[in-house]
Every structure is written in C-alpha cells, then in structure tokens.
Amino acid sequence: MIDPVILMVCIASATIIALASAAPKWREPARFRASLAAFALLPSFAVMPLSLVFPALETAGAIGLLFADTRVPAAIALIALFALFGVALAINVLRGHTDIDCGCSGFVTSARTPKSIGWWHVGRAFMLVALAALTLMPEAARALVWFDYLSAGACTLFAVAAWFTLDVLLVNLPKLDSLRNS
C-alpha cells in the first residue's frame, strides 16, 4: 500500500512528464520519425505507423492515469512504452550506435549539435518505468487534509523540475564532451 500523497505525486509527475514527452512528437512528426528510424531497429515500413502510434499511446496513457477507472490500462501502456524505449536505447548503446537524437528534450538541438545516447538515457527510461509502475500500487486508506494537497503539489513541482533538470543535463552532456575534446 502506498500513501495517497505519494500516489498523487506519482500520478501527477508521470502525467506531466509523459505529456511533455509526447508534445514534441506531435509538434515535429518528421523529426520523431527520423529519430525512430535512426535507432535502426524497425523495418522501414513500420517507422511511419509507429511514429503515430507511440505519441498516441503516450498521450492516452498520460491522460488515462488521471482517472481511477483507466489508471491500470494507462499505467500498463506507459510501462510497456517506456520499457520498450529503454530496451531500444540499451541495444543501441551496446552496439555502439550512440549518435542518435533520442528526442528526450523535444528535438531542440540543431543538426550541427553533437548528439549522443548512453547508459544515463537507459537509466532515465527505466526510471520512467518505475514511476509509472508506482501508480499501480493500491492506495492506503486515510483521510486527507489540506496540507496533504499542498504537499502533493509541492512534491510534484519538485519531482518534475528535477526530471527536466536531468533532461537538460543529458542534452548538454555531448556538448560538454565535444568542448572537452576540442
């Protein structure tokens, strides 16, 4: 059983992060399609349909987490999606194919900017799996007071800010390596 405040934080954080991850895929479908193809794990005929299915699943999963009736299938969809992404990242890191724009920060880098994936990206994907899995835990029964809602809001803000800080660090890691080696 999980405390209701922790559950609220997990649900809100997972929803915000998943929606923020899906938004650039909808906004720049061509770049997402190119990123998906760069993983070199899918046959070329599957890239186009999956470039539409993945953001749709991510969006539906994020919204589904917000409602008790749809939380279980939504969490399972997000867990599967994030785990699949983590495995795809790990396969490419293992085979040394690391010059990929994973789209983690919304395809904000230019074509000239150095890009790279690594084990930090794999760990990040599996942290999302764990976060989505926490939303499946049964909630402990206890009365909530106003301070619980305040705590949930503050903790959600902190968790999301920490997550996006990690995102920025991962985006800048190849740039820092490039500067170090120049």
Image (cartoon, rainbow, N blue to C red):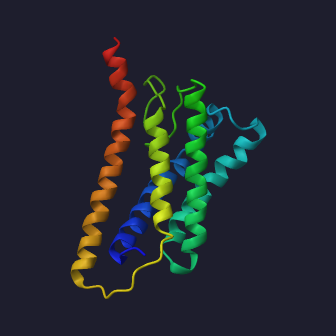
- The image shows residue 67 at horizontal and vertical percentages of 50, 77
- The image shows residue 75 at horizontal and vertical percentages of 55, 65
The image quadrant of residue 16 is: bottom left
Going 57% across and 50% down the picture, which residue do you hit?
83
Task: Work out which quarter of the rendered image holds the N terminus and state it.
Answer: bottom left
Instruction: Report the label total.
Output: 0
Q: Is residue 90 above or below residue 137?
A: above
Q: Is residue 68 left or right of residue 5?
A: right
Going 46% across and 39% down the picture, which residue do you hit?
121
23 or 7: which is nearer to us? Answer: 7
Going 33% across and 37% down the picture, which residue do you hit?
169
- Residue at the extreme front of the image, as rendered: 1
Q: Is residue 127 left or right of residue 160?
A: right
Residue 107 seen in render: no
Going 43% across and 42% down the picture, which residue do you hit?
105
- Residue at the extreme left of the image, as rendered: 147
Residue 181 seen in render: yes
Task: Work out which quarter of the rendered image holds the C terminus and state it.
Answer: top left
Q: Is residue 77 left or right of residue 5?
A: right
86 or 27: which is nearer to us? Answer: 86
- The image shows residue 46 at horizontal and vertical percentages of 75, 43
- The image shows residue 47 at horizontal and vertical percentages of 70, 41
- Residue at the extreme top of the image, as rendered: 182
